[in-house]
Image (cartoon, rainbow, N blue to C red):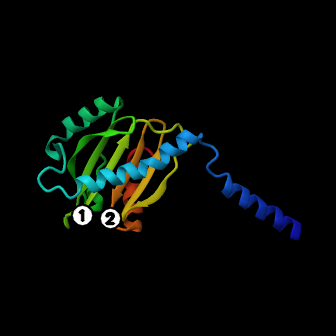
Amino acid sequence: KLAAVAWIGLGVVLGFALRDQTLPRADKAAVASLPRQAAIAHAVFVPEVRHPVEVGADQQAHLVAWLSKRLGAPLKAPQLDSAGYALVGGRLLAGESGEVAQFMYENAEKKRLTLYVRREAPKAAGTAFRYAQENGIDVFYWTDSRFGYALSGSTGREDMLGLGNLVYRQFGG
């Protein structure tokens, strides 16, 4: 019995140590930078009163078409109304290696969320839903075969998890 427990323990330790070995080193760095870049963009634009977005929600079809064209693949602005957040609008940002889209949402208490979408997502073996906290900003992020997504806000981890799952499901997760 002791030998079996030892083998299981060794398997757990090795599994933990090798958990990130499925991505090449450059791809790991790209995944790790996603929440940081999203949090920075969130922190820059969320406080804006007069110009939080380039294109407002009243022009949602134009916004989505423009950002889709710039990122080179179809995008959509998730609907978060069921969670109390309405689309404010969005903007085009410069990312580490190209264009990035940012959608902004706001609730009745004026709390804001941003969804950061970039094209250069690493080609991971599967979608990985992860959490990070960057300077007090909660970020849930994941990648799929085309994009890297990061939902940022300061609502607390549990609320952000629910919101992240809502967005994730709308993108086919």
Q: CA distance from mark 1 to mark 2?
A: 8 Å
How many labels were placed on the picture?
A: 2
Q: Relative to the observer, which residue lies in front, 98 or 116?
A: 98
Which residue type carries mark 2? Answer: Ser
The residue pinned by badge 2 equals: 154
* Residue positioned most to the bottom: 2
As drawn, the label of residue 111 is 1
Label 2 crowd bin: few (<14), some (14–19), many (20+), radius 10 Å: some
Q: Relative to the observer, which residue lies in front, 28 or 164?
A: 28
**Image x and y of residue 168, in percent:** 41, 50
**Image x and y of residue 147, in percent:** 42, 39
- Apparent side of residue 106 relative to residue 115 in the rendered image (left or right): left
Residue 171: image quadrant is top left
Q: Relative to the observer, which residue lies in front, 6 or 98?
A: 98
Q: Is residue 167 visible?
A: no
Which residue type carries mark 1? Answer: Lys
**Image x and y of residue 81, in percent:** 26, 56
**Image x and y of residue 1, in percent:** 88, 70
Q: Is residue 87 visible?
A: yes
Label pair 1/2, CB-CB below 8 angstroms: yes
Label 2 sits on a secondary structure element that is loop
